């Protein structure tokens, strides 16, 4: 039988009786609540973090990955949930932010049983959290979840895979960053290094190739790299050396925390703009990038295309909202220059202001 450790409401003030680790982390990101579900039969170990519901129900993808520890999984869920709130706020969507992390077992014996159990977990939250695809999950998985709850998007009968529109948003971000930082009106011969060329990274490479960019790519999957070399004439870079590659734009499109203590002073790019979530291991590293005169474009601003897609599908509304990412990036850059404040802190402040000023917007999902 599944065990539901349900909601742990998170207090807004410090309580000396609480364990200082997870609760302090939750409080530091402004999390509203966190939920757990355990099911020994299917192997499900699920975490749903709800960051903010002021604008509407918490919307965010389901990530299914192996983690070095349960603590890492919980912290990842919390930080990703915060990013989803910021992303939704910047995109002016009628949703709050949440995220689910499934600690992937060595083997999922029955994907149907696994995701049906997870769907029941989502349904038990009565619409406070709505899910969609993310790293390690697919449209097929969303269809299975949909057997047990209506609080799921990006199903085959709905908006489907959002990868292309995620990449399209990043393209608009790169175009804006190159314009304001490098004073270039196009991407012809601009050197762009893409770290991670899965669904989103490959779509981005295709879009950038059409713009005339010179591409370098890396991935732990050799076949993914080979495909980009053959299709776009990209330069293959060893995955362990990509961070040191000399380029105009470094575009992280794999997992997060790529800018960390080991890498922050090795990056040889003028601009960082990519699809990966939580590229800064800690906000402090954004300050270091700023001191190093590197324009870091906050990931949640430019990777919102996928979130927009799961709500509006392939539509004029989606294209219009994604195109506005260009103006958001240019605005953040200009404010940073005027205020002499790192771009990620400018963006965080804008997002927090939007959230604090928002009235709850009804979302019929």
Image (cartoon, rainbow, N blue to C red):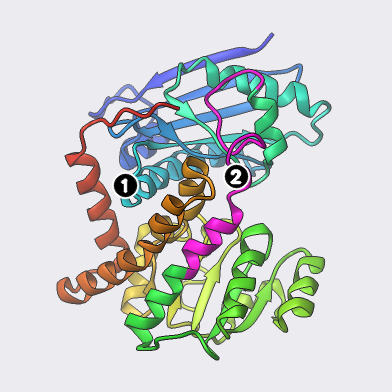
Q: Quadrant of residue 104?
A: top right
* Callout 2: SS: loop
Relative horizontal placement of residue 196, taking residue 313 as reference (left or right): right
Closer to the camera in the image, 360 or 62? 360
Magenta-highlighted stretch: main secondary structure? Answer: loop
Around disc 2, counting alpha carbons within 10 Å, would you say few (fewer than 14), some (14 to 19), or many (20 or more)?
Answer: many
Q: Residue at x 63, y 35 (%)?
A: 155
Q: Where is residue 95 drawn, in percent x and y?
A: 37, 36
Q: Residue at x 23, y 71 (%)?
A: 336
Point out the residue furthest to the front here: 316
* Callout 1: SS: loop
Q: Which residue is mark 1?
A: 92
Q: Reply above or below: 39 against 264.
A: above
Closer to the camera in the image, 198 or 290? 198
Q: Where is residue 290 drawn, in percent x and y?
A: 32, 74
Q: Where is residue 170 drawn, in percent x and y?
A: 49, 65
- Tell me the magenta residue range: 147-171
* Residue 133 is covered by the magenta coloring: no
Q: Quadrant of residue 93?
A: top left
Q: Give the number of marks.
A: 2
Q: Quadrant of residue 159?
A: top right
Quadrant for the N terminus in the image: top right
Q: Who comes first in sequence, dot 2 or dot 1?
A: 1
Q: Which residue is mark 2?
A: 134
Q: Where is residue 192 drawn, in percent x and y?
A: 56, 80
Q: Reply above or below: 118 against 217.
A: above
Relative horizontal placement of residue 322, taking residue 276 as reference (left or right): left
């Amino acid at each position: 039988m599944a065990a539901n450790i349900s909601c742990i409401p998170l207090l807004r003030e410090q309580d000396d009786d609480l364990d200082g680790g997870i609760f302090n982390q939750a409080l530091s990101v402004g999390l509203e609540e966190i939920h757990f579900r355990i099911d020994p039969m299917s192997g499900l170990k699920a975490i749903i973090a709800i960051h903010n519901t002021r604008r509407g129900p918490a919307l965010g993808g389901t990530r299914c990955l192996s983690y070095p520890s349960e603590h890492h999984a919980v912290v990842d869920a919390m930080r990703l949930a915060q990013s989803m709130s910021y992303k939704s706020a910047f995109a002016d969507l009628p949703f709050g932010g949440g995220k689910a992390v499934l600690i992937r077992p060595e083997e999922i014996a029955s994907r149907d049983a696994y995701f049906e159990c997870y769907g029941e977990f989502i349904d038990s939250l009565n619409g406070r959290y709505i899910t969609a695809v993310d790293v390690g999950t697919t449209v097929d998985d969303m269809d299975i979840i949909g057997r047990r709850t209506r609080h799921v998007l990006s199903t085959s009968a709905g908006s489907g895979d959002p990868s292309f529109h995620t990449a399209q948003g990043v393209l608009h971000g790169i175009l804006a960053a190159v314009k304001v930082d490098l004073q270039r009106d196009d991407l012809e011969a601009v050197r762009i290094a893409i770290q991670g060329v899965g669904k989103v990274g490959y779509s981005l490479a295709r879009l950038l190739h059409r713009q005339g960019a010179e591409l370098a790519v890396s991935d732990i999957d050799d076949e993914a790299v080979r495909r980009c070399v053959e299709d776009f004439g990209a330069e293959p870079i060893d995955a362990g050396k990509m961070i040191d590659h000399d380029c105009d734009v470094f575009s992280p499109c794999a997992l997060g925390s790529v800018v960390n203590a080991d890498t922050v002073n090795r990056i040889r790019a003028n601009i960082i703009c990519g699809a990966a979530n939580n590229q800064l291991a800690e906000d402090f590293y954004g300050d270091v990038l700023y001191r190093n005169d590197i324009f870091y474009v906050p990931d949640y601003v430019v990777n919102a295309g996928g979130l927009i897609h799961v709500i509006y599908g392939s539509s004029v509304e989606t294209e219009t909202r994604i195109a506005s990412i260009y103006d958001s990036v240019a605005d953040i850059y200009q404010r940073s220059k005027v205020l002499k404040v790192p771009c990620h802190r400018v963006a965080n402040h804008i997002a927090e202001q939007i959230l604090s000023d928002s009235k709850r917007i009804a979302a019929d999902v």
